[in-house]
Image (tube, rainbow, N blue to C red):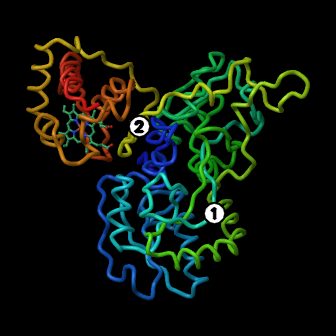
Amino acid sequence: MTSNKRRLAPLAIEPRKASVLPALAAALFIAAGPAASALPSDGAAGGDALTICADPDDLPFSAQAGDAKGIYIELGAEIANALGRPLKTVWSQTYFGKRAIRETLLSGKCDAYIGLPDSKNFMGPKLIFSKPFLRIGYALVSPKAQGASSLADLAGKRVAVQFGTSPELLLADHGDIQPVTVLDPEAAMKALAAGRADAAIIWGPSAGYLNKTLYQDAYSVRPVSGEGMQWPVSVGFARASGDLRDKIDRVIDEKAEAVAALAAKYGFPQAEPISLTAASSAGGSKPSIMLASQEKPASETAPATAPEAAAPAPGSTALTETPAAAATPASAADPAAIAAGREIFNGTCSHCHGPDAIVGQRRINLRLLSQRYNDKMDEVFHYTVTHGRPDKGMPNWTGAFSEDDFSKILAYLHSVQQN
Ligand code: HEC
């Protein structure tokens, strides 16, 4: 099961949706794990085996333990088989996105990385890609009996969306739909099952997999089309591996059916994507799907791009719903509050986040919070300090500090943001 790890980070993607793919890559394909460490491999690239890098705990994509291997691992086996080579997997927890790719694929630890976004923007010319073999993205989930398939169907309903994702932004433009904000697909499915939401627009592969493995296929899971909603997935290679890429491209051509079968096995939503952002037509021929209200398509009102960042995941943890109201930084400009916040920070937080929040690892660099989350910074801060990210090593500080303390720490952090 995807367990408690919020690794299918649509969350992480979304803050930068306009630039989409690079962000995406950092986020979902390369799932999130506590510590990026490519395990050394004895027979990495070079031997007879086809070596792939994969995350050890990222179902439905890949898993090291348990019976379900994940679609990327099974596809890897198919490909290796077709090439007449044994498959070898280098397990590497890949929280860091690009960095993980640099430390694995681009350092020669594996021949191929299955499941990268097919985009030159991702890491520039260092990476080359196979043809896309799959398309993944968000999906509309609703009880089968209702089979919601348009925004109009959702009017007046409570719809679960993941914090910080395109679907959340989409609903923000539709006041007639009541968003139920959750942190991950599992929480959304729970909310549906418990009757706390009527539908959900969440990360499709997870929704499909959960629907199949935990919910007896009770829900219809339909991919949603549109800006920031679906992405093609490829196999990535280091630039020098053009020959292998060409061979694998030929295998991919032959494996379309096998891929479809695997996608079905893992419950990936397969239907044609439905549009929830349909443009309103100028009379005459009505588009099949209309916006509930005659607003502009959400794609036109998409939020500004947030800067590139290293795969944060505001929700990368808890199962809780709805991030709490944001703490307001205690008078952001108040020097006394900033000084007090700095003192608390350097007393407690600096052990991990560095003295004065200066730290080499981008992932825990709190000077990048505003780059990473823009105007959601306060909300993410408050949620994270009061819930922790237990699976990532960030403690929950509830009880250790007062709201006032948190505000001061936040005021301090505001004073050191790199913009
Ligand atoms: C024991 C180590 C540790 C300590 C101490 C710690 N943190 Fe963290 N914190 C982490 C880790 C690890 C992460 C990254 C979690 C992840 O990868 O999602 C994190 C993440 C965060 C984030 C979210 C960062 C982001 O970009 O999403 C915030 C905010 C944060 N910590 C604030 C604090 C504050 C404030 C304190 C002090 C009260 C503190 N942390 C103390 C380990 C720690």
Secondary structure under the numbered disc 2 in the rendered image: loop
On the image, the x and y values in percent for residue 305 come to 47, 33
In 3D space, how far apart are the residues under numbered discs 1 and 2 (Cα atoms)?
A: 28 Å
Residue at the image position 47 percent from the left and 69 percent from the top: 237
- Is 253 drawn above or below residue 288 in the view shown? below
Type of the residue with mark 2:
Gly
Q: Residues within 10 Å of mark 1 (few under 14, many from 20)?
A: many
On the image, the x and y values in percent for residue 110 come to 40, 73
Secondary structure under the numbered disc 1 in the rendered image: loop
Residue at the image position 74 percent from the left and 24 percent from the top: 291
Type of the residue with mark 1:
Phe
Q: Is residue 141 or residue 417 the one in the foreground?
A: 417
User: In this rendering, does residue 68 appear at all?
Assistant: no
Residue pointed to by mark 1: 133
- Which residue is at the far right? 284
User: Quadrant location of ligand 1?
Assistant: top left
Marks 1/2 in contact by CB < 8 Å: the verdict is no
Label 1 CB sits under 8 Å from any ligand 1 atom: no
Question: What number is the disc on residue 315?
Answer: 2
On the image, the x and y values in percent for residue 85 come to 52, 86
Looking at the image, is mark 1 or mark 2 earlier in the sequence? 1
Residue at the image position 42 percent from the left and 59 percent from the top: 57
On the image, the x and y values in percent for residue 408 come to 18, 19
Question: What number is the disc on residue 227?
Answer: none
